Amino acid sequence: MFEHFIAGELIFLFLGKTLGFNITPAFLLFGSFCGFLPDLISYFLSRHVHYNKRYYSHRDNLSHTLFFPLLIFAASAFPFGWKISLLISLAALSHPLLDLYGLGWGVKLFLPISDDIYKLFFKKKIIYVYANDDERNRDVERFQTDDWFQKVYFNFFSKKKSSFRRELLIFGHKKWWNKVFLSFDSAPKWWGFFEWVSLAAAIILPLLYHFKILT
């Protein structure tokens, strides 16, 4: 969620400098907006967002596919120029790629061509593919809870073992990187901390340019 803001800003910052843009707080905030754009489009397309364990369903449309950034570029390159269109498209592309890991239960990257659902570092695989919604829904019902926001964003320092930690032990994930990156839940335990740090960074970066600390 929050990492999309800083991802968009960083793309506008580094690539924007390379392309010769003047980096201003407004320019960075626009990058932040573009990084979050797929979710905004998705809320419009879905017209309803579940805030329970099925919150992930807002990703199941064109807004979170690899084709959406291409559509943005095609629609904006002529009126606005290829440089700014490239920045907007790459910021939008960062969104589904980040959603492959962390919060949520995968992304349908190739809709409408394919309904396959891709998730990174899941079930002992670097890339795990759910063949259909039914397969994913079984995992969601088993491991996800309606209070996911509280659990991920406010309980990341809790010493209490969650259900997916116990599942990791059952499935024999004893290597340290498996325990850090692999999960049977919507997110690894440290993800909430990462989210808050991302939000803080997305706020601080434009302020640094506003007060001329960075130029």
Image (cartoon, grey):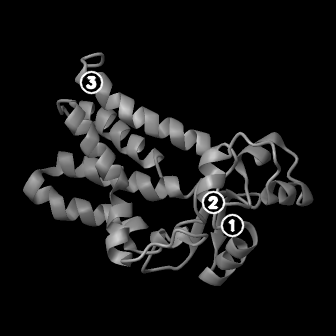
* Distance (Cα) linking label 1 and label 2: 7 Å
Nearer mark to the viewer, of 3 and 2: 2
Name above or below for residue 81 compared with residue 210. Answer: below
**Tag 1 near tag 2, CB within 8 Å:** yes
* Distance (Cα) linking label 1 and label 3: 40 Å
Type of amino acid at the residue the image marks with label 2: Trp
- Identify the residue shown where x is 60% and y is 39%: 193
- Identify the residue shown where x is 42% and y is 80%: 112
Determine whether, in the image, residue 84 is placed left or right of residue 50: left
Asked whether the viewer can see residue 178, the reply is: yes
Nearer mark to the viewer, of 1 and 3: 1
Type of amino acid at the residue the image marks with label 3: Tyr
* Distance (Cα) linking label 3 and label 2: 35 Å
Task: Name the residue carrying label 2.
Answer: 148
Task: Name the residue carrying label 3.
Answer: 209
Type of amino acid at the residue the image marks with label 1: Gln
Q: Position of residue 199 (x, y in %)?
A: 45, 40
- Density class for disc 2 (Cα within 10 Å; few <14, some 14-19, many ≥20) is many
Q: Position of residue 12 (x, y in %)?
A: 29, 39
- Per the image, label 3 sits on a secondary structure element best described as helix
Q: Position of residue 4 (x, y in %)?
A: 42, 48
**Tag 3 near tag 2, CB within 8 Å:** no
Task: Name the residue carrying label 1.
Answer: 144
- Per the image, label 1 sits on a secondary structure element best described as loop
